[in-house]
Image: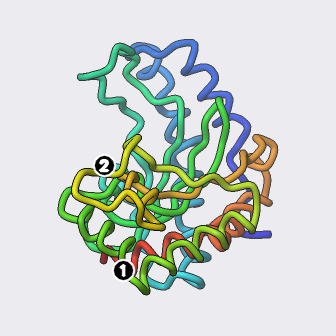
Amino acid sequence: MSDFEGFPEAGIQFLRDLRENNNREWWEDNKQVYIEQVREPALQFVTVLGERIKTIAPNIHYDLRVNGSGSLMRPYRDVRFSADKSPYKTTVPIMWWEGSGKKMEHPGFGFQISLEGNGMMGGIFGFPKDKIDVYREAVLDDKKGPALVNAIEAVLAADDYSIEGQHYKRVPRGYDKAHPRANWLRYTGLWASSPEIPMDVITSPQLVDVCFKHCQNTLPVQQWLADVLN
């Protein structure tokens, strides 16, 4: 159990209502509900889980700013290149990360409330351009490469996790297709996704314990990436 009592039912209902009324006028009329029932509980959750994560990954950062630089993502969608012009997110995405700089450029842990399914991740969604070659060299390294395989096997043995981030159908040009770890060269990000977290857990005091367990279970992959990329 923890000091966090779970996300309020009113916050989840706000997301449902937003899905049906995703427009600026409704948002402005209901923004205070977002602040009180979604944003403020989310920031409390960031702190409580963040402090727990630090017990297993001392270099993890969290940030309570709400301008997009902090752990809680902004609620506004980038619609410039999307056919869906809905201006607001009906999800609540949060990150805790290890490394200096932008949160999405470092290995960490992610959490998301979504009306389509809630979950956690450990790893990195996409390697920065200056890190992709570092990752590939580590995969091929005689010590770091087997350590990655061991980390992935440990995560998969812990629960019903999936390893994601594969982008290429083929091994990138210039690399040996027959290498025993060539498959991992096809990844442009690498993360372990948790089984779905039921909504009744999202709104309960159990949430921090459940999420912390997912952090513990995905830690081998997150820490391997932190050691290699930071």
Pointer 2 residue = 67
Horizontally, residue 173 falls left or right of residue 188, namely left
Mark 1 burial class by Cα count in 10 Å: few <14, some 14-19, many 20+: few
Query: Which quadrant of the figure has residue 130?
Result: bottom left
Horizontally, residue 33 falls left or right of residue 76, namely right
Tell me the amino acid under the disc marked 2: Asn
Q: Nearer the viewer, residue 221 or 172?
A: 172
The spot of residue 19 in percent (x, y) is: 56, 19
- Determine the secondary structure under disc 1: loop
- Determine the secondary structure under disc 2: loop
Residue at the (80%, 69%) spot, across then down: 1
Q: Is residue 219 above or below residue 166?
A: below
Tell me the amino acid under the disc marked 1: Asp
Pointer 1 residue = 141
The spot of residue 153 in percent (x, y) is: 65, 69
Q: Nearer the viewer, mark 2 or mark 1?
A: 1
Mark 2 burial class by Cα count in 10 Å: few <14, some 14-19, many 20+: few
